[in-house]
Amino acid sequence: MRTDVLIKEGERVDDLHRKGYVIIQDPKRFCFGVDAVILSGFARVKKGEKVLDLGTGTGILPILLEGRTLGSHFTGLEIQPESVEMARRSVALNELEEKVDIVEGDIKETAAIFGGSVFDVVTSNPPYMNEGGGLQNPSGPKAIARHEVLCTLEDVVKGAAKVLRPGGRFYMVHRPHRLTDIMCTLRQYGLEPKRLRLVCRRAGDAPSLLLLEARRGGRPGLDIAAPLCLEDGTGRPTAELDNAYFRTKETNA
């Protein structure tokens, strides 16, 4: 880990418990949560594949996926300049400049930025709340992360569909109340839903998140996995959640 990377006042450096990797975060802006972590465990990246993360924020998914998989290169696209700058410092801090790129740009311009059919895998942890849905956080960065202020679900799916190679895979974490919107939008842009997993706090609870894999040009047929529970009956993290956070021994996929 480099020691010459600037850490600004109010920022903190969090340990990612993998390969010595860390990430710079600012609690006043937005810090990654369990949704990004479980998405990194749900996404399947094969050896040599190229990955794009749409709306990467401070770069958590490209860094986690580089630490977890054998993909050849990871790119994060982010519209907020402050987040881009922070993500690039995290990449430098981890000495990952040759494996991870952070690009400043608008998800609506994804194909114009990268070209068509260039990535094997696209991931996204997009804003969950559509316009008018829920109370918007008054903080700009947090509102952008949680609400469809600068991009919509359709913008994310459309961008993913254009840059994925035929047969390429799209992985997303979202909220169950948007499932109908998600399924319809995916098919509208030629991404066939292939794998769905609901996420609940404890067994028997209603799901609070969903994980979804879609394939460009895939055949119809959806595999619904057993729910992912975050806590056991005593309130302790499940072994699967510990694994997602690299708190148990794990090998690269």
Image (cartoon, helix red, strand yellow):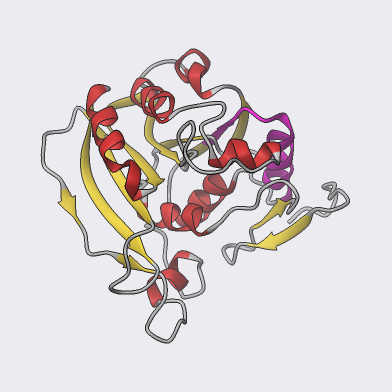
- Residue furthest to the right in view is 9
Residue 33 against residue 166 in the figure, above or below: below
Viewer-nearest residue: 21 or 162: 162
Image quadrant in which you'd find residue 154: top left
Q: In this view, does 23 lie to the left or right of 148?
A: right
Q: Position of residue 175 (x, y in %)?
A: 38, 48
**Residue for point 85% across, 47% down:** 6
**Which image quadrant: the N terminus?**
bottom right
**Residue for point 73% across, 41% down:** 86
Q: Where is residue 89 in the image (x, y as percent from the top left)?
A: 74, 43
Is residue 89 within the magenta segment?
A: yes
Please provide the residue range marked out in magenta. 75-93
Q: Position of residue 7 (x, y in %)?
A: 84, 50
Q: Where is residue 245 in the image (x, y as percent from the top left)?
A: 51, 66
Residue 251 against residue 5 in the figure, above or below: below
- Residue furthest to the top in view is 112
Image quadrant in which you'd find residue 71: top left
State the predominant SS element of the stretch in magenta: helix
Q: Can residue 99 be seen in this view?
A: no
Is residue 225 within the magenta segment?
A: no
Viewer-nearest residue: 203 or 68: 203
**Residue for point 56% across, 43% down:** 135
